[in-house]
Amino acid sequence: MALRGFLRRFKPFEIISENQVEQIHESTLDVLAEAGVKVHHEEALKVYKKGGCTVDFDSKLVRFPPALVEECLRKCPSSFRVKSRNPEHDLVLGLDHVVFFNFPGRDIVDLTTWESRPPSRQEHIDLVTVLDALPSVHFLNNYPYFGYRGIPENMKEMEGAAIRLAHSTKVTMEIANNDIDRFTFRMAKAIGTEIFANPNASSPLTCYTDQTNACFLAAEYDLPSMIWDGATAGSTAPASTLGAIISGNAEVIPYIVLLQLLKPGARVAVANLVLPQNMKTGAPAFGDIGVSLHLAAYNQVWRRYGIPMVASASGVSNSKIIGFQLAYEKTIPSLVAAISGSSAVQIHSSVYGEISSHPVQAILDDDIAHMIGRFVEGMEMNDDSLAVDLINRVGPIPGHFLGDAHTRRWWKREQYVTRSADRLTYPEWKNGGKMNEIDYAKQRLEEILSTHKVAPPLTAGEQGEIERILQEAREYYKKTGLISSSEWRDYMKTLKDEDRMI
Amino acid sequence: MSLKGFRRIFKPLEILSDEQVEDIKRGVLAVLQNTGMRFESEMALKLFQKHECMVDFDAMKVRFPPGLVEECLRKTPSSFYFKSRNPAHDLIVGGNTTYFCAFPGMNTVELDTWEPRRATRQENREALIVLDALDNLHFLTPYTPYFGFDDIPPVLSIPESAAAKIRYSTKLQFSGYQKDCEVYTIEMARVADTEIQGMMESSPPLTYYGDAVMSAYRFANAGLPLHITSGAVMGGTSPATVAGTLVTSVAEIVGGIVFTQLVKPGTRVVANAFVFPQNMMTGVPFFGSVGISLHEAAFNQIWRSYNIPVQSSAIGPTNSKGIDYQNCYEKAIPALVAALSGAHIIQFHGGVYGEITHHPVQSIMDDDVAGVIGRLIEGIDVSDQTLALDLINEIGPIPGFYLNTAHTRAWWKKEQFVPKVADLLPYGQWQKEGKKTALDRAKERMNEILQTHRPVALSDEQEKEIQRIIDKAQSDYAKKGLL
Amino acid sequence: MAEEKKDILDNLKKAVFEYDRQLAARSAVEAVEKGIDPIEAMNVMTAAIREIGQAFGKGELWLPELVGASDAMQGATPILEEEMERKGRHRESLGMVVAGTVFGDIHSIGKTMVTTLLTAAGFHIEDLGINVKAEEFSAAVKKHDADLLVMSALMTTTMTEQEKVIEALNKEGTREKVKVMVGGAAVTDEFAESIGADGYDPTAPGAAELARRLLAV
């Protein structure tokens, strides 16, 4: 049992040639051997040195021999399982399947004013509940909101992690800032679920301490890693698509090498959150076509390496509202990602950038994920589906196929009927109150929130263990000054109101 | 000169294996030979009989020998020139180029209530001016934009629409057929010194009515191109399976091609899919559904293997009544699939709900999406410059960055597409500037276009001739009791 | 005998639920041979269709099941109706409906969907088929004392036939006694109104609902 997603039945679409993929690979090896990467982690520098790299301990620069790079890439499994505490929600990430997951947003968006604000704890729980319920969400990103009101900055993600672990059994992940992952990995272990470590590359060509440390934690806890490239093309990466891929790959490969040196055969996936730069505002150009161009070629390169790859930049748009622009800015790159070979596509729930999210959007994205998934599953071709005998029997008009057994047998397999879309005729639509897709999604939201329960719920003991680890984290951050006294006061009040004081 | 369109530089997406393509083609030949088609035209049946098809005149059925079918497919050109009265709007259909085409609606739609109403003549003209102005719209469809306007009687709607398109745009158009109206539209095209594309639509399953046959006959004889359409509804007028529908839809179009090539060998043809799954609750076509994409991807692959230009039409209509999220994804998904799988013409701009409504603001928003898709199929430049190896090695790790480099200045625009009406502002600025959405900007752009864009006008002589033809159509129809 | 009757009626029901037209025909012949009341036999099948119609209304079943069931029932209906006529018996129903596709048009699918739903709702359908001339519609309306006339025309070139049918009804003097519904891909509310029809709906379920409203049943 496991969540495998949709099986892609046709050869992934290829935007560049095989030769061009090789050119990218050669160039990447060259950058790693020539320019190298700065790794701000003493212990990692020692591991690299021992592994055969050229290391300058003063400048922190590491140069990687091509043979070592290729060996470490080869050691990564092309498909692997991540275990959940509910085996039905184990995740299998592999090259010919496509799974989907959510894209985070810091705040919740108001569906009338389109203004965003920090969510309440209940709203955070509600979004996780929806994500747990939606069939096309196969695992969860970190967040999905950035904590909730009344929580200090440094505890926001961890409190969010505790909510994810309690209210969903879908596999999740954790960011590697300020030891957050250290505590979250312990929470996950306490309840018997695996979780992704998330080392992030820093562009250009840099690995910072926390992110590198995530690799050590992943090895220690024997967890899979999802390694992120989040460069901005034209700013922290070259403006050309291929230049950005080469530079980005040179940034994530050091983590792969480290993981394989620490624990050969470590489970690894790479994630692409590379965005072009908006050259007017300086912000990332969310939703730009450069995202799709990048993803398509990137997928080809990582398929060559045989390592699962995750499309993330597909999940983010510049639109502030749930409307036309949001649809094409997310749908186009998500579809491109899926058909060009992404193992996972990030899409659900995000509205504007990484700023806003809403469960209604997650529900709308469920339809799109299903449509994309159904498309990559392609067509069944056999004598029954070709139906030549049937066609000959029915003949020209007045023949038709509606009442035939063949139609009853096949139509559901060949269609995906959207669940939150308007499919009415004009008179029905007018008489029914002119409902649009957002209205249908709101109805579905109510239905999910009133019926869906996480299965199985955490035991009291497990919940208690999570609270205990959270408390340890709170005290640690207070001690290290990462939670100020005023924040601490407000935080304690919040916990008291939630009846969660220990 | 000609409209550049979007040139795909990589191999198209293929969702069938070569063997599967052969299976479909085998099915097509088998159906055409064994069951054949119904052609409700004595003229067509006689022509088929002359070329050794098996004809049953009583049942109006024809069965096609496979050798004849394959010969006629071979005679159909793999690409062709299509001439406008403005050479800048000529098209070269085929190869690896994709053009976008408008999608019609019976009515316009109110942008505040989303309710349909009949368009005025002025609104029809404005919608055409917008289409003429849009960068990524290359072709106008038969009823575009509206099936009729003002109080034009139904029988005159196609001639009046064709005349409006010729007057207010120099982009090429298709002509529909109804009560022999193609006689007038062909004549209008001739006096305006432009070509015009005809239509031949099958009635699934496996049937052509007399008017479709006559339209094809007239256009082929006039030396004009044709698009031949299957409008199957999967599970209703074709098998519920995509594979089975490929057999019937391709067979229907192949039957039409055989007819046109027998009328005039070498007739320029585009094979068109207007195929939808059936909505099994209401019985109407299931607009916007993913079955459209599955069918068209395979359909495009098959017609590319026949080396005949192909069009994807089922993209234009959605189920949504308004220009919103659902409207967009229901069109963007099949449009992207069509482009990636090698469609030469994608029918896209302007369609709002079903074939019921069209609006120029929709056309403007669709133009951005067409631009996005077009840029994608133009692919990625691979060169030492774009690999940027030397630059990467030079810039090195942080604190290096690329924003101020010559390379960024040279390349960033080529690797991005900046839509004309999308909201690209950061949050604070968006709030300050009135929270404008893409829809708001599209409305502004429409006003801008109408104030500034002037299509190339007809000469006075041409205008007089066009009106004369309309008047003749009116008088002819009145004599026949149709007015 | 009672056992035999039960088996035959069960088979008629089964034929509808399993979309088996041949079983329906065979069982109808058996029913007639064994002297089973043809109305009782028909009622078994219409009850089955109604159940399928209710499941359709709830979204549990779909048009292919409904039309498949109706097709199956059509295997038995002519046999049983002939027997009813022979015995001088008449079935009760919500109303008598004459249906057909107009002259020049040979599409049957729209008409099939609507008549199936009307059958499921409890109407008695006299389906004239396709390519039906105006005079034939008019004659059938008179002969069957129809409450409702349902016409389908898929093309712009044939939808005008529907106006001719209404003219024929006017001429025959039956127009006031029968409600007229028109349908087809090109038909609109405005067109329906302009030719003097009583109603139009773009979907099959909507048309069935409209029929009930027009006849106030």
Image (cartoon, rainbow, N blue to C red):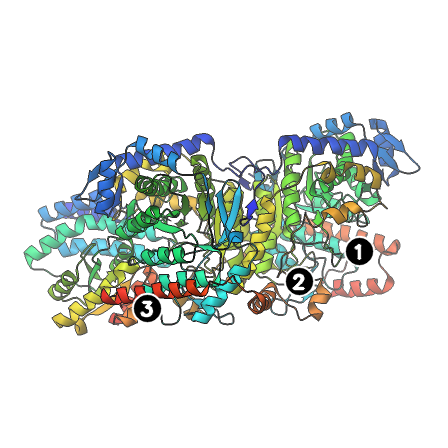
Q: Nearer the viewer, residue B85 or C68?
A: B85
Viewer-nearest of labels 3 and 1?
3
For residue A484, above or below residue A46? below
Q: Give the camera-side residue of A454 and B458.
A: B458
Residue at figure coordinates x 57%, y 56% from the top left = B135
The residue most toward the right is A58
The CA distance from mark 3 to mark 1 is: 71 Å
Q: Residue at x 28, y 46 (%)?
A: B207
Same subunit, labels 3 and 2: the answer reads: no
User: Can residue A131 be seen in the rendering of this structure?
Assistant: no
| B459 with respect to A179 (left or right) | left
Q: What amino acid does circle 3 point to? A: Pro
Whole-percent x and y of residue B174? 41, 54
Q: Quadrant of residue B464?
A: bottom left
- Helix, strand or loop at label 2? It is strand
Residue A300 screen position, x and y as percent: 63, 36
Tag shown at residue B153: 3
Mark 3–mark 2 distance (CA, rounded to whole Å)? 53 Å
